[in-house]
Amino acid sequence: MRDIIIEDKLALFIKEFSADLCSLELLIYFGRHPHARFNSTAVLHALTIKRFDTNAALKILVDKKVVVSNFENGLLLYSLTKQEPTHSLVTKLVSIDQSQWQTIIEHILKGQGIF
């Protein structure tokens, strides 16, 4: 990601936590709604990528403690972690401009052998 002009911590965070487009879209989704809680159905319907691996990507983000899961009133709900600096880095994702996103997505696709 050497061509992306964003702060180093954010670039490293993107590289570490968005190994695929589904994880990246989940990070952006939670970054847009940093204080909300969603059940898995709401998360799946909000994403543009309707892929079978969305649940797997969500589980990975939970395992890495970027997203937290809690039972409330018998429902499993997901939300962005409140732990810093992770919380702030995810919320900064929504401020990246379009040309930088294109470079990030190309990098992810190359890593997956698609591009």
Image: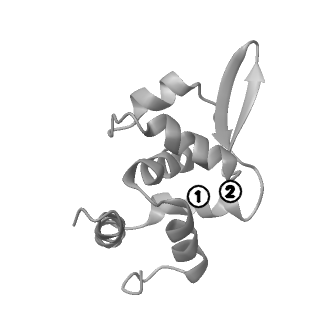
* Above-or-below relation of 5 to 77: below
Which x, y percent locates residue 87? 68, 56
Q: Which of the labelled discs sits on residue 90, or is there none?
A: 1
In the picture of the structure, the residue carrying the numbered disc 2 is 87
Residue in view at x 51 percent, y 75 percent: 11
For the residue marked with disc 2, what is the amino acid?
Answer: His
* Residue 83 point in image, percent of width and height: 78, 55
State which quadrant residue 97 falls in.
bottom left
The number of discs equals 2
Amino acid type at image mark 1: Val
Give the residue furthest to the bottom: 2
Q: Give residue 98's quadrant in the image.
A: bottom left
Q: How is the image coloured?
A: one colour
Q: Nearer the viewer, residue 91 or 80?
A: 80
Q: Position of residue 3 (x, y in %)?
A: 36, 85
Residue 89 sits in which quadrant? Answer: bottom right
Residue sticking out furthest to the top: 74
Residue 34 seen in this snapshot = no
Residue drawn at (42%, 83%) of the image: 5
Residue 15 percent location from the top left of the image: 50, 70
Task: Name the residue at the left extreme.
Answer: 115
Residue at (68, 23) in percent of width and height: 76
Say if mark 1 contacts mark 2, CB within 8 Å.
Answer: yes
Q: Which structural element holds mark 1? A: helix
Q: Residues within 10 Å of mark 1 (few under 14, many from 20)?
A: many
